[in-house]
Image (cartoon, rainbow, N blue to C red):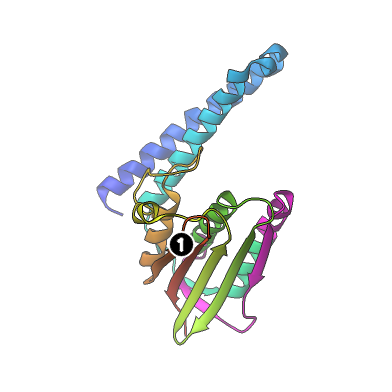
Amino acid sequence: MDEKELSLSMISHELKNPLTLIRSTLQVIESRHKELLKEPLWSQVYQDVDYMSRLLSELSALSMESVPKPSAVHVYTIMMDMEGMFLTEALKQKKILRMQCPKKELYVRGDELKLRQMLVNLIQNALDATNAGDYIDIIVEQEGNKALFHVCDTGCGMDLEQQERLFHPFVTHKPNGTGLGMVIVKKIAEGHGGNVRVQSSKNSGTKITIELPAAK
């Protein structure tokens, strides 16, 4: 990590602490003045604080090295954890989440926490881009010495302009998005010796493919 990345990470961390205190203070004030719950702007204050916390977390993640702790990562275990993490939320939103992953011993070499973060961002994006009744498929396959992770959805899709700006920081089409999620995905994939491919068309869904070297 170079000096600029270290400074950004430290600043993000230091700013998150007072934001956490601010949120706690808001909760105390709310407990003393219940009438604030009737004020529409009160919930907006919470949303703004949470947005800033999320933005700082993603800035910190963006500044960190992509592969600080490499090891052999069992892909099937991670994918089952992802299914457990998102299945309830998908059902709540009336979306169909389907997972396909070979049970064979497929491994990739890298940082497990970073790989999990990459997949969480991709699946969350798919949830945000879909409506009730839409499908989200997470498919893992091995192709030669490559592990391919496909996240496909039948959601709103993207036009060419949106695809070209997908990996630009702070560019987002989501109301509460930070515009850093896909930037982080790309950095993690490339930090693991892989790449990201995007296939999408407006109103026809999106397919994101992460290609990573498989571990021997």
Residue 179 position (above or below residue 19): below
Report which residue position mark 1 lands on.
200
Residue in the picture at 61% in, 66% down: 137
Residue 175, image x, y percentages: 51, 38
Residue 170, image x, y percentages: 37, 43
Relative placement, left or right, of 117 versus 40 is: left
Which image quadrant: the N terminus? bottom left
- Label 1 neighbourhood size at 10 Å, few (<14), some (14-19), many (20+)? many
Magenta residue check for 32: no
Residue 164, image x, y percentages: 34, 55
Q: Report the residue that reaches farthest toward the front.
A: 203
Residue 159 position (above or below residue 40): below
Residue 53, image x, y percentages: 49, 36
Q: Quadrant of residue 163?
A: bottom left
Magenta residue check for 93: yes
Q: Report the residue that reaches farthest toward the bottom.
A: 144
**Nearer the observer, 111 or 39:** 39
As shown in the figure, which amino acid type bears the numbered disc 1? Ser
**Nearer the observer, 128 or 18:** 128
Residue in the picture at 48% in, 60% down: 114
**Nearer the observer, 181 or 53:** 181
Relative placement, left or right, of 11 versus 153 is: left
Q: Quadrant of residue 12?
A: top left
Magenta segment, which residues?
Answer: 84-113
Q: Please state the total of marks drawn on the protein image.
A: 1
Residue 177 position (above or below residue 40): below
Residue 182 visible, this orientation: yes
**Nearer the observer, 53 or 14:** 53
Residue 148 position (above or below residue 35): below
Residue in the picture at 39% in, 71% down: 194
Residue 78 visible, this orientation: no
